Image (cartoon, coloured by chain):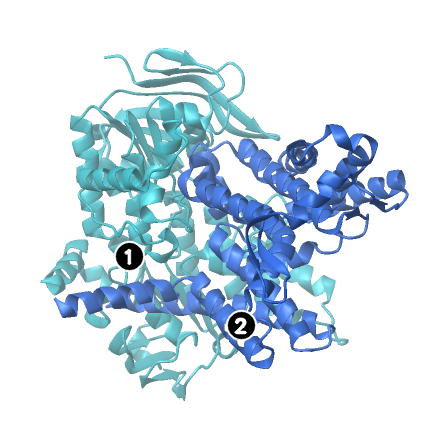
Amino acid sequence: MEPFLSLSNVSKHYAGVTALKQVDFEINPGEIHCLVGENGSGKSTLIKIISGTVHPDPGAEIKIAGEVVHGAQAIDAIHKGIQIIYQDLSLFPNLTVAENIALSQVVASRSHVVRWKTLDRIAREAMARIKVHLPLDALVGEISLAEQQLVAICRAFTSDVRLLIMDEPTASLTRKEVDALLSVVQEMQARDIATIFVSHKLDEVLRVADRVTVLRDGHKVGTYPSGELNDEKLTQLMTGKTVTYVPYTPPQSPETQEPVLEVRDLSKRGYFKNVSFQLYPGEIVGLTGLLGSGRTELALALFGVHQPDSGETLFKGRPVRFRSILEAMRNGLGYVPEDRLTQGLVMNQAVGKNITLTILDSLRNSAKLLDPRKVQESIQRWVKDLAIKVPSVESPVQTLSGGNQQRVVLAKWIATNPKVLILDGPTIGIDIAAKFAIHEIIRELAHRGLAILLISDEIPEVLQNTNRLLVMHKGYVAGEFVSSQTSVKDVQELIDHQDQ
Amino acid sequence: MTIKTSNAGVTVIKKLFSRHETFVFLAIVIFGLIITVVNPDFLTLENVFDLLKSYALMGTFAVGMLFVLISGGIDISFTAIATITGYVIAVLLLQNGEQLNIVSVFAIAGGVGVLLGIINALIIYYFNIPSIITTIATLNIYYGLLTVISKGKWLYGFPAWFGQYTQMYVFKFTAANGTSYGLSVITAFWFVLMLIAWFVLRYTVLGRSIYAMGGNSASAKRAGFNLLRLNLFVYGFMGLMAGFGSVIQALLVQTVAPNSLVGKELDVVAAVVLGGASLTGGTGSVLGTFLGVVLIAIMGNGLTLMRVPAFWYKVVIGTVILISVGASAYRRKVSARRRTIIEVE
């Protein structure tokens, strides 16, 4: 069979950095091909080259349906049947759902006049293909993230797709939605549509893929039939190292200590109800549940962003009620938000400036002005402590990889010397190797006596890295587990059971 | 059956109140009532038609500005462009005015305006300089060059045919005291421009692409939109409106002066923003822009009719803009909060 797309000898250099080096890649019609690799391995560059938004260095050969293409533009790729769903979804928040789904199709058809009925029809057809229902007239900026993801997927289905590229498509979907998506992908396969699937959730990769191509540091490690791979092997290929997980155990048994944070019957109408738990120094407690189960809202209430309606919070044995983030921080509570890109970092500012942002008060000299020496010392300490890989502390945060960005956020909060650290989805959207590194840091911090509340919707992640696990559902704590004696299945069953 | 209709009525009202334009319209009604109570001369057809004629200039500029703001940019240089196009047509009218007609005057002014707008677009696109910086720079360059060349001279004494358009009406009434008034061709021209703009923005791929670019330009690029072409169109169109505006100005006052327009940029931006366009791009409508211009018009005119000292005009306008923009930001915040709760439950 002739491959639908083949790339050979593709290299790409950006101002002194090699993003890709002599990579060959091919995908057959109807194949589900997964592309995996750490951040910075060249996955996104490869996708951008396929989509025509980035041009490879001279010497590369790209063939689509057997035909050599030169200097392709994004619109040419679309004409050739290549569609991409980007991780950031690339939607227009100010336009309606129908427009978002249908507009690029209308542009590609080179028509000049927009018929709103046609837009609606295109959108409805696309929705029918993946069996979802969305409000056509709603503005995309006003619907939920999961719905936005579906809009992006519908958009790809408006044209005659030959190759669909999905960049981390499942990052913000619930399990049910992921299942629905994967079945769509498999249905496409039956219609000879090729799919490139970029994901860091290895179980998903192995579930659907025919073949897996692994990239590392801009080189291709190899392409393997997915039958020959398992989780462990894949991780090893991606990182070049063998990594094994040991369940976390706190340095001291919790029972011998006073809880650092205790919550009793905390409720907030419409968000969560009667939540009670204790958190001991040195513990990592997991908090999981579906998107919208109230986990993030609970964390925000602990951090003083929202005020709970009833119940009490004890911090180091003392009842507290934080009225503001500042008050929570001063008392030794840190919170790393779910969306680090928009909430946790000042993206265009230097790494050093981001790290010291939360502790500027303590870096002042006797004249109450910032002491440059203290600032530098502090920055150097944290960059070293958390092994943040940066060319210089003056580099803007946006130039770092996802994993390193996450370290900067962590550094920023640890610098405040908290007693309790709430981490909300600390590894969302970062690859497996960077994830390990983050997990290592979290364990190390807990080992030093910090109490950590780890919020994540990936059950394996919370099980492997915590000593206890709380499961939230519809605002309630539905269950508590001892992590080392619990399997993913146990937790999943509890959640599924709640749904019925 | 009755229940069903009343439900539909509620939805319509809800939909109306989710739109910024409704609030601007209500503000116009309230201001109109207050002014009329103080001075009944305000709500006369004569005054209304007069206002629509004299604000056709700001309205035309506002149509161009609307496109720029929706695209996510801003153009401060349009007054300088209009001053240049005004000078060009004034010089031509004075030298061989008899060979020209109104169409060619509009075409020349528009053409020069488009050219200058395209220069803005090219700088913004290729050097990737924020549009506000680019157009502040070109405002100074365009206006500076004009001052050097024209030496600040006022031009007047245009051919007679050019003067007749101010007194030309689409339809006309005669008041009891013998003066006549009606819908000026200048107002009608502005209305036609708005209709075209409305159609382009709502029913053409070009128009929707401009909204898309303003909403998320990175996505627009990925979706295969030609951003250079869109920029060229948007700033070129602003230049065209600046050119047309300069002709309207010349028609209205029969004089071209170097300092009559520059300095009024922000009034136009204010009118468009008042009408619901956002400085961050992606939103705005022709109807809203029209209402924004009307609101500014009746405030200016109304304060005069109420014999409020002219100094207060700016204070009132500023306050109204703050309230308007603040209220719509607040409504967004409320609706966002409502959404989160729905998601949780």
Q: Let me know if residue A352 appears in the view.
A: no
Residue A346 in percent (x, y) is at 56, 56
Q: Nearer the viewer, residue A378 or A256?
A: A378
Q: Nearer the viewer, mark 2 or mark 1?
A: 2
Q: Tell me the residue at 18%/61% (across/down).
A: A485
Instruction: Say which residue label 2 marks.
Output: B32
Kind of element beneath mark 1: loop
Residue A203's disc is none
Q: Nearer the viewer, residue A420 or A74?
A: A74
Apparent side of residue A134 relative to residue A41 in the rendered image (left or right):
left
Please give the chain letter of the residue carrying mark 1: A
Judge if badges 2 and 1 mark residues of a common chain: no
Instruction: Say which residue label 1 marks.
Output: A457
Quadrant of the rendering where the N terminus of chain A is positioned: top left
Task: Give chain B's shade.
Answer: blue
Q: Quadrant of residue A116?
A: top left
Check the image and report above or below for A408 versus A366. Answer: above
Quadrant of the rendering where the C terminus of chain A is positioned: bottom left
Q: Amino acid at mark 1?
A: Asp
